Amino acid sequence: MKIVTTPMCEEIVRLAGINNYIVNKHPDEEEGDLAILLSESKVKMNSLPIKLNTPSQIFESIKKVSQIAENELSDEDILAFFDDYELSKKYLNSDFKRDISVKVYSEFLKDIVVDAGFNIDSENFEYSVFPDYLKGSVEETENLVEIPSHGDISKNPFERIEVRYAILETLI
């Protein structure tokens, strides 16, 4: 099977034990049997969409991708990948509840904000959380929290979580 993945998903493919794959930001430009890509992306070939916004999504994505590899990983194998990432490990299977309401300006940030225990409220909020690509177009002028999206951040999903969750932890 010829697998094509995007740069944002490559680390998951590698960790899942797949060694023979092609990386292309536009998988349909390749001759492939299966594209492994972010769930928001669409391609013409068969695809395995994954989500990488929260630690539990990373865990589930590694598990899902490893099922198509020759050796499916156990939960313990996958948990070991979290050992070097403090916030990823802290928020994996966590149930934090914070008494802080935020307005959120993007779908991928909603996953992160809820996972970090914040309440989403578009009317009565203390902070506005927005992705970097919306800088300058957010309505509010106070208590703005800018979160890096995909352009200026590591392709490694664990490193993305470490940066994004560290920013949110400054609010508590």
Image (cartoon, rainbow, N blue to C red):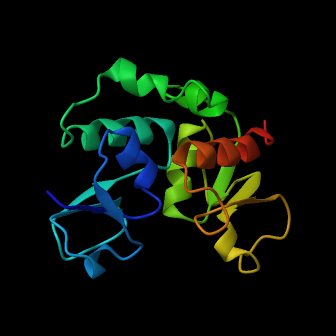
Q: Residue furthest front?
A: 20
Q: Is residue 113 above or below residue 92?
A: below
Q: Residue at x 65, y 58 (%)?
A: 103
Q: Residue at x 65, y 28 (%)?
A: 86
Point out residue 113 in the picture as x, y percentages from the top left corner. 59, 46
Q: Nearer the viewer, residue 62 or 57?
A: 62
Point out residue 43 in the picture as x, y percentages from the top left corner. 25, 74
**In the displayed structure image, the side of residue 69 where residue 98 appears, left or right:** right
Q: Residue at x 50, y 42 (%)?
A: 54
Looking at the rendered image, the quarter that the N terminus falls into is bottom left
Q: Nearer the viewer, residue 45 or 55?
A: 45
Point out residue 5 in the picture as x, y percentages from the top left corner. 34, 62
Q: Is residue 56 above or below residue 50?
A: above
Which quarter of the figure has residue 146?
Answer: bottom right
**In the displayed structure image, the side of residue 30 where residue 135 appears, left or right:** right
Q: Residue at x 22, y 31 (%)?
A: 72
Q: Is residue 121 above or below residue 136?
A: above
Q: Residue furthest right?
A: 142
Q: Nearer the viewer, residue 9 or 95?
A: 9
Point out residue 44 in the picture as x, y percentages from the top left corner. 19, 77
Which quarter of the figure has residue 26?
Answer: bottom left
**Number of marks:** 0
Can residue 66 be seen here? The reply is yes
Can residue 96 be seen here? The reply is no
Q: Is residue 67 above or below residue 126?
A: above
Looking at the rendered image, the quarter that the C terminus falls into is top right
